[in-house]
Amino acid sequence: MDVAWSPVSSTSFVCVTEASIEVFDISISALDPIISHVPATGHHLTTVLYSKCSPCMFIGDTEGMVTCYKLRNMNLNANPDDKAEEGKKLMDKVEEILQRQKDTENRIQEES
């Protein structure tokens, strides 16, 4: 299993398990991937890496093969204001998740 944060979005990351590739955007859902893909090769996936100069990610497997996946709708030329906005979105989402966790813990304590 391997994980890599998006180089252009502070709320997105990709995860590879032995059998699948899952892309998450925690600004949409912290639990469910926005994309889930099972490659037809049947080989165990081991590694993921985002390209630093193109909208691609590279997935490696146990057979030594590397597959390039082109990503769409990624803003590679984000300006600093966009990056600040992405950071704010991430912090807002983290605070929302922590508040939900705290609310759940409080309800459990009240029910006990």
Image: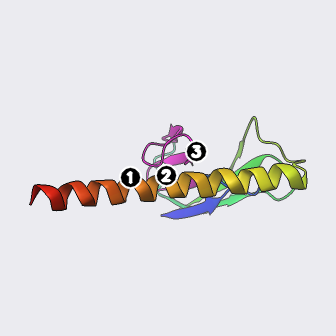
Q: State left or right for residue 33 relative to residue 89.
A: left
Q: Is residue 93 above or below residue 47?
A: above
Q: Earlier in the sequence, mark 2 or mark 3?
A: 3
- The answer for how far apart the CA atoms under marks 1 and 3 are is 15 Å
Residue at left offset 55%, top offset 51%: 93
Of 86 and 38, the residue lying toward us: 86
Q: State the extent of the magenta-drawn residues as a range.
A: 13-39
Residue 13 in sight from this viewpoint: no
Residue at left offset 44%, top offset 50%: 19
- Point out residue 51 in the picture as x, y percentages from the top left corner: 78, 56
Disc 1: which residue:
100
Disc 3: which residue:
27
- The answer for how far apart the CA atoms under marks 2 and 1 are is 6 Å
| Quadrant in the picture for residue 101 | bottom left
Q: Are marks 2 and 1 in contact (CB under 8 Å)?
A: yes
Mark 1 Cα-neighbour bin, 10 Å: few <14, some 14–19, many ≥20: few
Label 3: state its secondary structure: loop
Label 2: state its secondary structure: helix
Q: Is residue 36 above or below residue 45?
A: above
Q: Earlier in the sequence, mark 1 or mark 3?
A: 3
